[in-house]
Image (tube, rainbow, N blue to C red):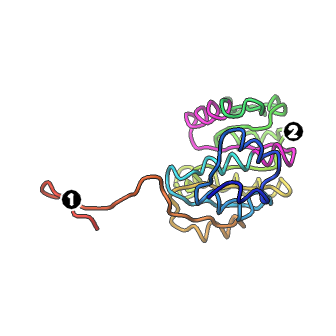
């Protein structure tokens, strides 16, 4: 699916940056997200397999927020290690964007983050920033929640649910992008998020299921 076929959906500066980075084609889930309203500030719940290109969907969302809408984006991940990984990746891929990582002291509003456009954090830290009334929150345009299926986790789910609920009430015209490879009730979650549901089963490597017994595999 050639990116050029979707040029009319993509802001000019974002499209130019994609060309600069060498992207020429979208994967199916990416194309569906663009057509589903990614650049029209719609909430999206993206449910596609691992390695199907969800990270680029998140990148398109924060590029749209930062470059086109002149706002901030907060990228929420469940683990500090994943936050560090995303921070290193995005710093390398987008050297002209001001990127910060915030995963430390929970008893701080991290006012220095006002100088940054993309903030990568964990749900616990983001919750703390909200409760400390960080002044830069009013500039947030888009929030990406990676591994959003953790809403169903007995330990982290309730805190993440409260976080999303508070965000939606305190930030006017917030765009919320939820990403997951495994959601058991995507339609119900999309309805709660007031989001367009993007589902696709394409994966870069075919997945076959089978049962191994006595040295043989019987595929279903």
Please tell me in which quadrant of the rendered image residue 4 appears: bottom right
Residue in the picture at 75% in, 31% down = 108
In the rendered structure, does residue 70 fall within the stretch colored magenta?
yes
Per the image, label 1 sits on a secondary structure element best described as strand
Residue beneath the point at 72% across and 59% down:
6
What's the mark number on residue 135?
2
Residue stretch rendered in magenta on the structure: 63-91
Q: Secondary structure at mark 2?
A: helix
Task: Residue 66: give x, y in percent of width and height.
Answer: 81, 43
Q: Quadrant of the C terminus?
A: bottom left
Q: Nearer the viewer, residue 30 or 103?
A: 30
Front label number (1 vs 2): 1
Report which quarter residue 131 is drawn in.
Answer: top right
Kindly identify which residue carries mark 1: 217
Residue 131 as seen in the image, left or right of residue 22? right
- Is 81 located above or below residue 148 in the figure? above
């Amino acid at each position: 699916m050639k990116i050029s076929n979707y040029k009319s959906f993509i802001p000019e500066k974002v499209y130019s940056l994609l060309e600069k980075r060498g992207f020429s084609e979208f994967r199916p889930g990416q194309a569906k997200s663009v057509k589903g309203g990614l650049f029209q500030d719609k909430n999206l719940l993206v449910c596609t397999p691992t390695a199907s290109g969800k990270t680029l969907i998140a990148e398109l969302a924060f590029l749209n927020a930062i470059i086109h809408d002149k706002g901030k984006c907060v990228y929420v991940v469940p683990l500090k290690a994943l936050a560090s990984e995303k921070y290193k990746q995005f710093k390398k891929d987008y050297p002209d964007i001001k990127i910060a990582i915030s995963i430390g002291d929970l008893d701080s509003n991290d006012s220095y983050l006002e100088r940054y456009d993309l903030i990568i954090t964990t749900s616990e830290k983001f919750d703390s920033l909200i409760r400390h009334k960080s002044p830069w929150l009013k500039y947030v345009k888009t929030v990406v929640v990676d591994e959003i299926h953790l809403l169903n986790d007995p330990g982290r789910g309730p805190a993440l649910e409260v976080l999303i609920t508070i965000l939606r009430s305190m930030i006017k015209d917030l765009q919320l992008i939820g990403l997951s490879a495994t959601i058991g009730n995507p339609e119900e979650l999309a309805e709660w998020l007031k989001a367009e549901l993007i589902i696709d089963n394409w994966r870069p490597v075919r997945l076959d299921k089978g049962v191994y017994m006595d040295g043989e595999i019987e595929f279903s």
